[in-house]
Image (tube, rainbow, N blue to C red):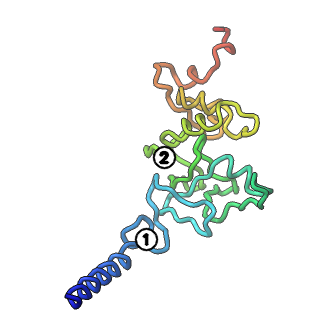
Amino acid sequence: MPSLHLARMGALVAAGSVAFALAPAGCIGGYDYSNVPEGDRCNPYDSHNECASGLQCTVSAWQVANQTGISYLGTPSVALGSGAGVDTAGNFNVLPFCPENYCCPVDPNGDLTTSTNPNCLPGCAGGAASICAAIGNDNPADPFYAGVCDFADSGVLPEEDAASTGAVPDAGDGSTPADASTPADATGGG
C-alpha cells in the first residue's frame, strides 16, 4: 500500500508541475505580458506598453492628476510609467469616465480612435455607473469625474469632454448628439 500511495503523490506532483509550467503561455499576455488584445486590462504603471500593435494603455483622469504628490495614505504617489499611452504631443490617452485601464486603438499620432469594444468607449462598459455609485455626480473632493452620473444616465459626454475626444455618443433618445448634450435651461426650454 505505501508504494501505491507514493506513486499517486508522484503522479500528482508531475501533473501539477507540467500544468504550472504551461499556465503562463495560455494566459493573456504570455510570459512577459505583451501583445494584450483590444479591450483587455493593462497596467499604465508598467515599464513598457504591454498592448498589441496599434493599441495603447488608457489612463484615468484621476491617475493623470494624481501621479505626483502624496496619496491619501500619506505615501508618495506612483508616477505613470512608459506603459501609459501618450500621443505624439505627450498628452495621456484618457478615456472619459473610465476607472480602469484598457488596451485601446490609437491613430498614427497616438490619439485614441474609434473602437467598437465596450471597454474602449467613454464610460468603459459600466465604469461610469460604478464611479457614479461610488462618488456621486459632482463630488467636490473628486472633481475628475464631474457629471459622471449624468453621463451614466444619458450616454452623452459633457461639452468639455466631448470637445477633447472629438465625438459625442448618441443618447439613444432620438435626439442628435448636439441636442442631447445641450442643457434644457441653456436653450430657453426651462
Q: Is residue 25 left or right of residue 95?
A: left
Q: Earlier in the sequence, mark 1 or mark 2?
A: 1
Label 1 is placed on what type of residue?
A: Gly
Which residue appears at 68% of the width and 34% of the height?
A: 146
62 or 16, which lies in front? 16
Q: Classify mark 2: helix, strand or loop.
A: helix
Element type at mark 1:
loop
- Tag shown at residue 152: none
Figure quadrant of residue 139:
top right
Residue drawn at x 46%, y 25% is 172
Alpha-carbon neighbours of circle 1 within 10 Å: few (<14), some, or many (≥20)? few
Residue under label 1, please give it.
30
In the rendered view, does 70 fall on the left or right side of 120? right
Specify the quadrant that holds the C terminus.
top right
Residue 27 in picture, x, y percent from top left = 40, 67
Toward the viewer: 162 or 12? Answer: 12
Percent coordinates x, y for residue 61 in the rendering: 67, 46
For the N terminus, the image quarter is: bottom left
**At which x and y percent is residue 88?**
66, 57
Q: Which residue is under mark 2? A: 119
Give the amino acid type for the residue marked by disc 2 in the picture. Answer: Asn
